[in-house]
Image: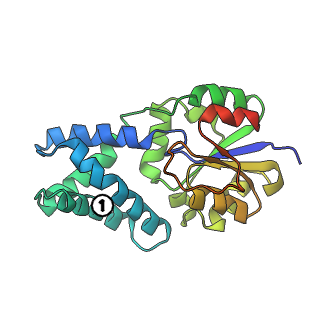
Amino acid sequence: MKIQHVFFDLDHTLWDFEKNSALTFEKIFIENNIDIKIDDFLKVYIPLNLEYWKLYRDEKVTKEVLRYERLKKSFDAANYTVSDDIINKLAIEYIENLAEFNHLFEGTFELLDYLKSKYTLHIITNGFDEIQSKKMINSKIHHYFDQIITSDSVGVKKPNPMVFNYALKAAKATKDNSIMIGDSLDADIKGALNVGLKAIHCVFDASSETDKKITAVKNLLEIKQYL
């Protein structure tokens, strides 16, 4: 059956999470007099953040634990002493400021313009309700998408089949006429394949885990070859 619906992940797929996150930390560290080199902090924070997102995805930690622990453990690993009050303050300010930076991956607008005339586009994201729409509005991509499905709204996270089935129902789509595009092999790609959707894996980082049996692209504009 011909593809009619294209579901995208947001962070690390269209929205350049690492770049925007780094700029956010730079801002809130200056405002809170955190005297640590941003590169030293990010070196420990990035892998810890990925680790805690996996735990959050697997329902092993809460949102509140994720927000606190990823900062606490990063400061500890960087040998920088900071109080719990400051960590909690930074955790809040990070979320409040993150959507103010809106770098997208190269080719985002060109790809979305190309796809919009051919397909109905949607978002499926594990990100938090209170920030994902802001990211999309501020980066001027919100209007491209018909349905924006967040894990918060469903109550479970990708790769749980409930997220994809909920999204298909909301979009009035079927697994046969839909495709998922995302960066996470487990959450986006295997999650989609397990419910019968087609999938394209965005592998923008050479160190990312891949599967040779799955269609993969190294930049967004390569997707035009398949859709």
Q: Position of residue 41 (x, y in %)?
A: 23, 49
Q: Residue at label 1?
A: 70
| Image position of 221 (left or right of 99) | right
Q: Amino acid at mark 1?
A: Arg
Q: Position of residue 1 (x, y in %)?
A: 89, 48
- State the count of labels: 1
The answer to which quarter of the image holds residue 111 is top right
Q: Relative to 99, does residue 46 appear above or below in the rendering?
A: below
Element assignment for label 1: helix
Q: Residues within 10 Å of mark 1 (few under 14, many from 20)?
A: many
Q: Position of residue 160 (x, y in %)?
A: 61, 67
| Residue found at x 71% / y 44% | 6
The C terminus lies in which quarter of the figure? top right
The answer to which quarter of the image holds residue 220 is top right
| Image position of 93 (left or right of 86) | right
| Image position of 113 (left or right of 96) | right
Colour mode of the rendering: rainbow
| Residue found at x 59% / y 27% | 109
Q: Nearer the viewer, residue 2 or 225?
A: 225
